[in-house]
Image: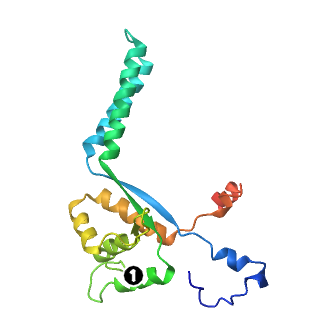
């Protein structure tokens, strides 16, 4: 990692604080994309059946519960196979600002947004999705993401867009790590 602008290189002068801050890891998050909604419906039905088997009397309660547990396990395995996990990693502030500038709304465009969301959304998703195994980023193009967004429903688009945006604009609250949750939540 190169030293940020304005760094003196003398971390000892401030007790190592600067050197420690340089070790900060980027904000990351994930989003599950269901490739087959029927697989998710099967999990829901299997959970309902298991709950019913546990709480409603039957001829052979133990056998019914074991059967329902097996069905739930099979449904969950099928659901994992029918989904993809997208991994998101933050952009540096200059990279994020450059992306925003590249997708500013044109003077004649209608709407209250400052940015052209039809181009910004796929560009930001493409820029933030990475492969955790190879550490490669990006792994999708804005054109590929725009094509997916054309095929997906609004809820799916919003979920993926929100993760990409949130890794770039949110800061984890370290007070939660120090047991100061009450202060972290109230501020």
Picture coordinates of residue 51 (x, y %)? 41, 26
The residue located at (68%, 74%) in the rendering is: 20
- Please state which of residues 17 and 56 is positioned toward the viewer in this rendering: 17
Left or right of 28 on screen, residue 156: left
Q: Answer yes or no: is residue 131 visible.
A: yes
The crowd level at tag 1 (other Cα within 10 Å; few <14, some 14-19, many 20+) is some
Which residue matches tag 1? 99
Is residue 177 shown above or below 37? below
In the rendered image, the residue lying farthest to the top is 59
- Please state which of residues 142 and 114 is positioned toward the viewer in this rendering: 142
Specify the quadrant that holds the N terminus: bottom right
In the rendered image, the residue lying farthest to the front is 134
Is residue 116 shown above or below 139? below
Left or right of 94 on screen, residue 8: right
Res. 180 image quadrant: bottom right
Picture coordinates of residue 149 (x, y %)? 26, 65
């Amino acid at each position: 990692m190169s030293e940020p602008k304005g760094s003196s290189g003398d971390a000892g002068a401030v007790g190592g604080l600067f050197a420690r801050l340089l070790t900060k890891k980027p904000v990351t998050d994930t989003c599950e994309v269901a490739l087959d909604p029927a697989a998710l419906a099967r999990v829901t039905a299997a959970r309902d059946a298991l709950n019913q088997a546990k709480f409603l009397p039957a001829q052979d309660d133990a056998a019914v519960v074991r059967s329902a547990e097996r069905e739930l396990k099979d449904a969950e395995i099928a659901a994992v196979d029918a989904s993809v996990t997208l991994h998101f990693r933050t952009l540096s502030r200059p990279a994020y600002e450059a992306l925003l500038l590249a997708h500013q709304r044109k003077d004649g465009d209608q709407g209250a947004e400052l940015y052209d969301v039809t181009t910004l959304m796929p560009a930001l998703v493409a820029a933030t999705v990475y492969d955790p195994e190879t550490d490669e980023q990006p792994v999708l193009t804005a054109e590929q993401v725009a094509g997916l967004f054309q095929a997906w429903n609004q809820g799916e688009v919003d979920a993926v867009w929100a993760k990409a945006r949130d890794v770039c604009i949110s800061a984890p609250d370290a007070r939660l790590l120090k047991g100061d949750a009450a202060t972290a939540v109230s501020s």
